[in-house]
């Protein structure tokens, strides 16, 4: 069922069993999971079914740290959320990503990869991927000619991705699920329903209601037994911090953790691989699947580095691309996106002209790195407010020396192994040659992956949410999405955040029965 | 013998010392790198290696280091990667042996 909140009488009261705030990857996946359940689910979405400049403007904010994409354009605010722009790349986190590593400060989740496995399988369905299979051996049986490079598997392995067909080019989750959600009788989707405040009980141990508003000037109240914030990692932190009438530092923020540990995936062109001879393989061709070189857990431990992978693209193409951090700077997300596509198309045509001789066998590596959890990398409230009266977000993205050292070392290890295997040579990009150089190049791109701002921990002093994604100390408030990540893993976040959200969804189903 | 005689006896050997060392030209041809670079690139890397390791910047020093592996130089290159005998030249992760081969190639140039 769909209701446009602009058309409701002012001061309406909406009541349900469960309220989900945000209809992006996390919110839609959970809502789908509740269809036909004997409960009324209220799904609140800030935008409508199409892009709307006024709504998108609510995302405007400041960037005060490491150079970043404009806050206004680094996410999308309408039904489908940022999947309206996502590329659809999906791969699960590795076992090591959940483990406490003594060389990665603040690492370690209260859950393991095994806990997520059944939910990963369900997340694959929601994202319309193939089966929950991410092993090279599985895919080699499905697709011919997936020949891996002859690298020592004790050091480097070939990590697989599946690319979702419901990507931004094909309308994202919005197009895939709009009709299903609208037709579902127990899912009440309210568009133009931006949450601007959260009410708690007197002792702030439970949420009693939400205030929603839109540009018509109307505001309404939402009441439910359980509330899940699924607005993306920046918005989730912003909503909690801005709800500071009853808790001076914001909800769930007794230990000053909300908004801290903001993480991105670094996606940087770091090296070139030149093959000595042609090596016939379709493994590194972009399609339904994708493959990158990953470093084994043992070698990460030995070198005390973060997890990361190197993705090979034709060098004739990568050398003609401009850093995304430079070209994705328009405040309008559609213009930023178009700029990036134009740059890629241009690189494609220039690359084709240059693709003769040994460069035709050369690849540019884009390293995809988890960012070390850093309390000084954070989302804060700005002094400016948006049109609906909510303080804007200020993103202070901060990288550490461990991030830089890890990127360099990963590429060095690959270079050493390629040399050992004798099939090519690797050249490090200029900014990754000097081991004492801790500066960041202009091409320090993020993947538009926002994580960690309400990190998960069993200990309320170390994390905002518990292992079930419930906000510590507030019995019916949960956070869904990558905000809950304790560490960011290297792969793109959406498959894991959908898995985690489905796990949360199961947990709430059990609790709602008890209530 | 007169003192002049002593000088005369010394000069020929000193000259031969400064003469270019004789070596198999294959030592100056890094087999793997020749598959991805042209001769100009090999020479450039060679020059950079000589700047990086001035102790090995002469033909004599390079020949001495390379000669003992002349028979199986390609195998030595692979061994270098296994034993950690690597160098970073202009960003390239190379075996020390192949980098020396480039350096030797760069010294074959007139005015090198
Ligand atoms: C260019 C680009 C490419 C990407 N490519 C990939 C990729 O290949 N693979 C991958 O895994 N990820 C990718 N991502 C990231 C991916 O899009 C996000 O990880 C994912 O969409 C996050 O899901 P979410 O539900 O947490 O948040 P979102 O999808 O951002 O959804 C949040 C929703 O909540 C709504 N909302 C926010 N605040 C409020 C409020 N106060 N009240 C009501 N509603 C609210 C928003 O309008 C929005 O619809 C990409 C992102 C971009 C920008």
Image (tube, coloured by chain):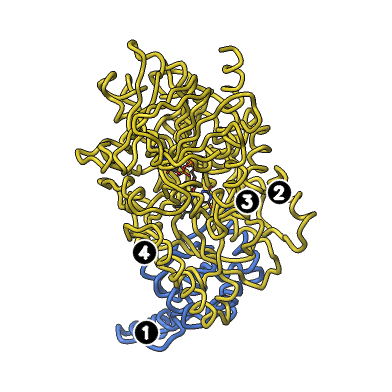
Q: Which residue is mark 1?
A: B11
Q: Position of residue A491 (x, y in %)?
A: 54, 46
Q: Between A30 and A432, which is closer to the camera in this rendering?
A: A30
Residue located 42% across and 24% down the image: A463
- Which quarter shows the N terminus of chain A? top right
Q: Position of residue A333 (x, y in %)?
A: 39, 57
- CA distance separating discs 1 and 4: 67 Å
Are there few (<14), some (14-19), or many (20+) residues within 10 Å of tag 2?
A: some
- CA distance separating discs 2 and 1: 81 Å
Residue located farthest toward the right when viewing the structure as drawn = A141
Q: Is residue A162 visible?
A: yes
Front disc: 3 or 1: 3
Q: Which mark is residue A161?
A: 3
The numbered mark 2 sits on a residue in which chain? A
Which SS class for mark 4? helix
Q: Is residue A463 left or right of residue A272?
A: left
- CA distance separating discs 3 and 1: 71 Å
Q: Which residue is mark 2?
A: A130
């Amino acid at each position: 069922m769909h209701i446009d909140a602009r058309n409701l009488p002012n001061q309406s009261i909406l009541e349900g069993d469960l309220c989900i705030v945000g209809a992006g990857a996390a919110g839609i996946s959970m809502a789908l999971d509740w269809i036909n359940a004997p409960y009324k689910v209220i799904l609140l979405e800030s935008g409508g079914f199409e892009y709307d400049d006024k709504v998108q403007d609510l995302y405007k904010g400041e960037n005060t740290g490491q150079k970043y994409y404009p806050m206004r354009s680094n996410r999308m605010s309408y039904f489908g959320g940022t999947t309206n722009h996502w590329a659809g790349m999906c791969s699960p986190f590795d076992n090591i990503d959940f483990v406490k590593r003594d060389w990665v400060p603040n690492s370690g989740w209260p859950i393991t990869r095994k806990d997520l496995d059944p939910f990963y399988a369900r997340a694959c369905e929601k994202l319309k991927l193939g089966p929950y299979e991410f092993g090279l051996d599985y895919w080699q049986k499905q697709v011919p000619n997936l020949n891996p490079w002859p690298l020592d598997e004790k050091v480097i392995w070939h990590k697989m991705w599946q690319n979702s067909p419901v990507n931004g080019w094909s309308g994202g989750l919005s197009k895939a699920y709009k009709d299903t959600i609208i037709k579902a009788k127990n899912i009440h989707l309210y568009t133009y329903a931006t949450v601007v405040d959260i009410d708690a009980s007197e002792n702030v141990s439970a949420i009693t209601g939400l205030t929603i508003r839109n540009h018509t000037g109307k505001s309404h109240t939402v009441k439910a037994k359980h509330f899940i914030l699924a607005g993306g990692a920046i918005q989730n932190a912003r909503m909690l911090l801005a709800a500071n009438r009853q808790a001076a530092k914001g909800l769930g923020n007794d230990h000053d953790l909300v908004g801290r540990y903001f993480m991105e995936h670094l996606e940087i062109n770091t090296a070139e691989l030149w093959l000595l001879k042609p090596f016939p393989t379709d493994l590194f061709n972009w399609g339904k699947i994708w493959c990158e070189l990953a470093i084994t857990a043992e070698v990460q431990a030995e070198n005390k580095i973060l997890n990361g992978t190197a993705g090979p693209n034709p060098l004739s193409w990568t050398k003609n691309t401009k850093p995304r951090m430079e070209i994705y700077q328009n405040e309008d997300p559609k213009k930023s996106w178009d700029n990036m596509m134009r740059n890629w198309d241009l690189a494609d045509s220039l690359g084709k002209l240059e693709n003769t001789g040994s460069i035709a066998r050369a690849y540019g590596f884009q390293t995809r790195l988890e960012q070390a959890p850093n309390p000084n990398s954070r989302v804060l409230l700005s002094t400016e407010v948006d049109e609906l009266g909510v303080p804007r977000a200020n993103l202070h993205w901060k990288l550490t020396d461990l991030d830089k050292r890890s990127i360099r070392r990963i590429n060095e290890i690959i270079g050493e192994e390629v040399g050992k295997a004798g099939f090519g040579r690797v050249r490090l990009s200029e900014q990754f040659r000097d081991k004492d150089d801790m500066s960041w190049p202009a091409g320090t791109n993020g993947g538009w992956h926002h994580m960690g701002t309400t990190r998960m921990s069993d200990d309320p002093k170390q994390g905002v949410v518990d292992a079930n994604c419930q906000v510590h100390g507030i019995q019916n408030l949960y956070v869904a999405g990558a905000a809950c990540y304790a560490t960011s893993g290297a792969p793109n976040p959406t498959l894991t955040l959908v898995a985690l959200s489905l796990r949360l969804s199961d947990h709430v189903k059990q609790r709602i029965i008890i209530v | 013998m007169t003192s002049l005689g002593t000088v005369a006896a010394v000069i020929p050997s000193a000259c031969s010392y400064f003469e270019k060392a004789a070596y198999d030209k294959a030592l100056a041809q890094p087999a793997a790198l020749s598959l991805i670079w042209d001769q100009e690139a090999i020479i450039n890397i060679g020059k950079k290696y000589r700047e990086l390791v001035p102790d090995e910047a002469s033909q004599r020093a390079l020949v001495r280091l390379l000669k003992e592996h002349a028979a199986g130089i390609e195998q030595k290159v692979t061994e270098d990667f296994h034993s950690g005998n690597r160098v970073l030249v202009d960003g390239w992760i190379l075996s020390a042996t192949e980098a020396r081969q480039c350096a030797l190639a760069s010294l074959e140039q007139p005015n090198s």
